[in-house]
Image: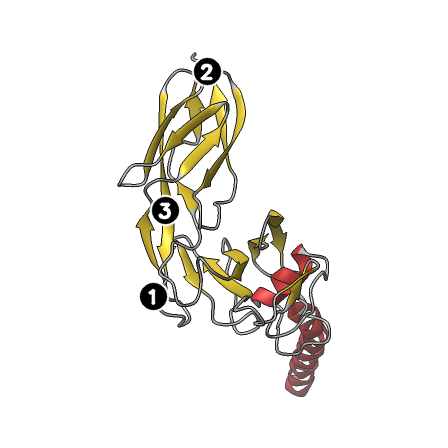
């Protein structure tokens, strides 16, 4: 009986191997991390922050941009609305090809502030990453030390009408164009608006607001010469 037991085990092992082999392609196409994508054009926002879960597919026609690359996230968020090049020149109908010292720059925020990207195909995204594509051109960008881009941080998950809410405007100082470069610093003089309120950030980047009405407010932070911050939504509730 021993040979029969060995054959049964061998058959079971072979079956497992066959199933594993058959399952391999499906695993390769498994869904990837969930990330956020935003596109800031030269004069306006072309794509407000959009959350996508990577499909597990590479960028069509570009083998360099794998299934978890920044390019794959851009592909899904824009529904293919870019040139799909390793060096992006056209994105959502707007072209920048270095002819006027302007080009599409890639930034990634992994939770500690935006850092300069290392390449749309080279950078691999993780869950929670925020991908930002913006036009690098004067007055910010290469050759400058301007704050690029702004971000509105802090504050409670829920605010209460009539009570103070303190937030902080942060930005990135870029002194080199190496991948991962960028120092996050507080930004003074930025204007924060939303919910019928307006305030200007102090030397520590802080702003204080009070909201009179309950509801969801959309907060924006902007400063001349800087890339604006993405909209921050805050739920305001009446006192209990």
State the CA–CA distance, disc 2 to disc 1. Answer: 42 Å
Q: Secondary structure at mark 1?
A: loop
Instruction: Pick out the residue farthest to the front.
Output: 100
Real-space CA distance between mark 3 and mark 2, rounded to the nearest whole angstrom: 26 Å
> Is residue 114 visible from the viewing direction of this image?
yes
Residue 162: quarter of image:
top left
Question: x, y (%) of residue 92?
Answer: 69, 58
In the structure shown, which secondary structural element does the residue marked by tag 3 occupy?
strand
For label 1, the residue is: 175
The residue wearing badge 2 is 212
Residue located 43% across and 27% down the image: 198
Identify the residue at horizontal 36%, vertical 69% (top origin).
Answer: 176
2 or 1: mark nearer the eye: 1
Residue at the far bottom: name it: 3
Near mark 1 (Cα within 10 A), the count class, few <14, some 14-19 or many ≥20, is some
Toward the viewer: 155 or 181?
181
Rendering colour mode: secondary structure
Residue 143: x %, y % from top left:
39, 67
Tell me the residue at 42%/36% (across/down): 191
- Residue, x 68% and y 56% (percent of image)? 78
Which quarter shows the C terminus? top left
N-terminal-most mark, 3 or 2:
3
Please rate how many residues cluster around mark 3, counting C-alpha atoms within 10 Å: few if below 14, some from 14 to 19, many from 20: many
Relative vertical location of residue 224 with respect to residue 16 in this rendering, above or below: above
Q: Which mark is residue 170?
A: 3
Q: Is residue 30 above or below residue 151?
A: below
Please give left or right for residue 176 compared with residue 77 in the image: left
Q: Earlier in the sequence, mark 2 or mark 1?
A: 1
Residue 195, placed above or below residue 155: above
In percent of width and height, residue 22 lies at 73, 75
Q: Quadrant of the N terminus?
A: bottom right
């Amino acid at each position: 009986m021993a040979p029969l037991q060995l054959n049964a085990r061998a058959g079971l092992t072979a079956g497992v191997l066959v199933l594993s082999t058959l399952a391999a392609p499906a695993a390769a196409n498994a869904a990837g991390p969930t990330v956020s994508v935003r596109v800031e054009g030269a004069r306006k926002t072309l794509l407000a922050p959009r959350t996508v879960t990577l499909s597990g597919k590479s960028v069509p026609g570009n083998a360099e941009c794998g299934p978890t690359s920044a390019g794959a996230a851009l592909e899904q968020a824009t529904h293919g609305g870019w040139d799909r090049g390793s060096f992006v020149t056209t994105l959502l109908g707007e072209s920048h090809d270095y002819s006027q010292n302007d080009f599409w720059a890639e930034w990634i925020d992994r939770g500690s502030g935006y850092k300069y990207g290392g390449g749309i195909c080279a950078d691999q995204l993780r869950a929670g990453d925020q991908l930002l594509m913006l036009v690098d051109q004067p007055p910010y960008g290469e050759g400058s030390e301007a704050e690029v881009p702004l971000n509105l941080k802090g504050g409670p998950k829920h605010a209460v009408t009539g009570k103070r809410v303190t937030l902080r405007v942060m930005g990135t100082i870029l002194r080199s164009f190496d991948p991962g470069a960028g120092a996050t610093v507080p930004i003074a003089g930025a204007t924060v608006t939303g919910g019928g309120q307006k305030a200007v950030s102090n030397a520590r980047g802080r702003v204080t607001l009070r909201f009179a009405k309950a509801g969801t407010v959309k907060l924006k932070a902007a400063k001349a010469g800087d890339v604006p911050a993405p909209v921050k939504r805050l739920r305001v509730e009446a006192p209990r």
